Image (cartoon, rainbow, N blue to C red):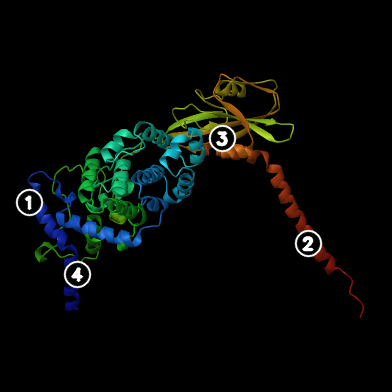
Amino acid sequence: MYIFKVGHFLISLSLHVIYFFSIVERKLKAGNGSPSIHDFSEVEKNQFRSSLLAWYDEKKRDLPWRKQALNPDINQRAYAVWVSEIMLQQTQVATVISYYNRWMEKWPRLQDLAKVDLEEVNELWSGLGYYSRGRRLHEGAKKVVEELNGEMPKTADDLQKLLPGVGRYTAGAIASIAYNQVTGLVDGNVIRVMCRMRMMGGDSTGQAVQDKLWSHANSVVDPERPGDFNQGMMELGATVCTPKSPSCDSCPVKHICLAYSQVEQEKQKSAKKILTNNNNIITDIECLTDNCPLCFQDDNTWEPSNGVENYPRKGKKKAAREERTDVCILCQKGHDSKDQYLIVQRPNKGLLAGMWEFPSLLQTEESENPIETVLDKACGASLRTTGQRQHIGEVVHIFSHIHQTYVIQAITVEEGEVTLDTEQPPSRWVSKEEFLECAVSTGMKKVLKAFESVLSPKSSSNKKNKKTASKPDDKQRSISCFFKPKSSS
């Protein structure tokens, strides 16, 4: 039993000894006011690079933009990375793959994208959300072709300065992956990995933590393979160091992760396996600087049951503003008995710029706008008849900063009973198929679905009646057979 305890102690000691010596080093630095526990030593940086790259080479996912990034043409390589990074903003990889493949098939070169109009871009982007991203890509492609002689900017600084919609992160991604520039990047996945690696419990959206994250990203990036290292960081955050239920046991850099070490210490404490101060205690990992902005703030403290999920911490998100919008589905019955719907194009600036929608009008008061007012102000349409009117109901759609409620009214008229003002925003009649193929938002598709669900209960009830009607027949046949007279033998 004694040998067993000694063996266990040696294993525990080997797990934490690297942190013990790093803490001693950081204690010496603490006199200079440096929150050194949140920094990487040179040894840790080298371990981070080698371990992460070895893992990435073995485990990286087969994604289409990674193949495109191998294009020998440096401008096309940068274009392919640019498209993928813009699409991946606020959107899951699984959703992006099909959109990316369609995009690159339709516009394989930067020059191809620059030639088309915005409506084509919006049509392909429809359903992907955050539509300004597609518009900025289109604007950027035209700028590169028309003002930069078809040459993509070649540094992270120039990418951020010259391309619309390209921020610090996207510029770093393009520069490191396409140009092999030694520059770091910080996205949601990197934030999570870094905050756990260095036990940063401060508000991850705050300036102090953001500055430290970017400093780390630029200092730890591998100088020989910056693109692969940055992709490895994002891959680690997406597949292993996930927001919930992270796979710490399979993490390639757990041996230098302070949050993981903290969890292990908590486990040992709960099992009473850490020795007391009189018996060579392994010192707890802690920041040695008072009021450190990178540590937990205010009432936020380490919660053992959450483990590494204690990191990162985010500030309170600003509540989305509430909006209610009246929507009119104007359905026109044509001579060919095919329904046509009136849609109008939104302004070229602002939310959902250039997209198409049913005539809509934001409510400024609690009362709803009459159908005539919605049609007049949205697209200058006027009715020569009252038509068949129906209240459809409400549909909720959440934008990043708006909680939108669509209040839907429908009116059906015969062909020729609607007059359109040609000086108003562009409008047109479309079939259902054309509506779904043009550049409409997901919110408007929800509106159409709600409209159809209200109009089709009869058909669905008929199907139910047919199903229930068949059951008595089956049962009746079995009953008839039961009462069938026995044949004489």
Mark 3 vs mark 1: in front = 1
Q: Which residue corresponds to mark 1?
A: 28
Q: CA distance from mark 3 to mark 2?
A: 42 Å
Q: Are marks 2 and 1 in contact (CB under 8 Å)?
A: no
**Residue type at the position of mark 3:** Glu
Residue 352 percent location from the top left of the image: 47, 32
Q: What is the quadrant of residue 33 in the picture?
A: top left
Q: Residue at x 38, y 52 (%)?
A: 66
Per the rendering, the mark at residue 394 is 3
Q: Residues within 10 Å of mark 2 (few under 14, many from 20)?
A: few
SS label for mark 3: strand
Q: Is residue 202 above or below residue 324?
A: below
Per the rendering, the mark at residue 11 is 4
Determine if residue 312 is in view: no
**Residue type at the position of mark 2:** Asp
Q: Residue at x 45, y 31 (%)?
A: 351
Per the rendering, the mark at residue 296 is none
**Residue type at the position of mark 1:** Leu
**Residue type at the position of mark 4:** Ile
Q: Which residue corresponds to mark 2?
A: 474
Q: Residue at x 70, y 23 (%)?
A: 417
Mark 2 vs mark 1: in front = 1
**Left or right: where 213 falls relative to 368:** left
* N-term-proximal mark, 3 vs 2: 3
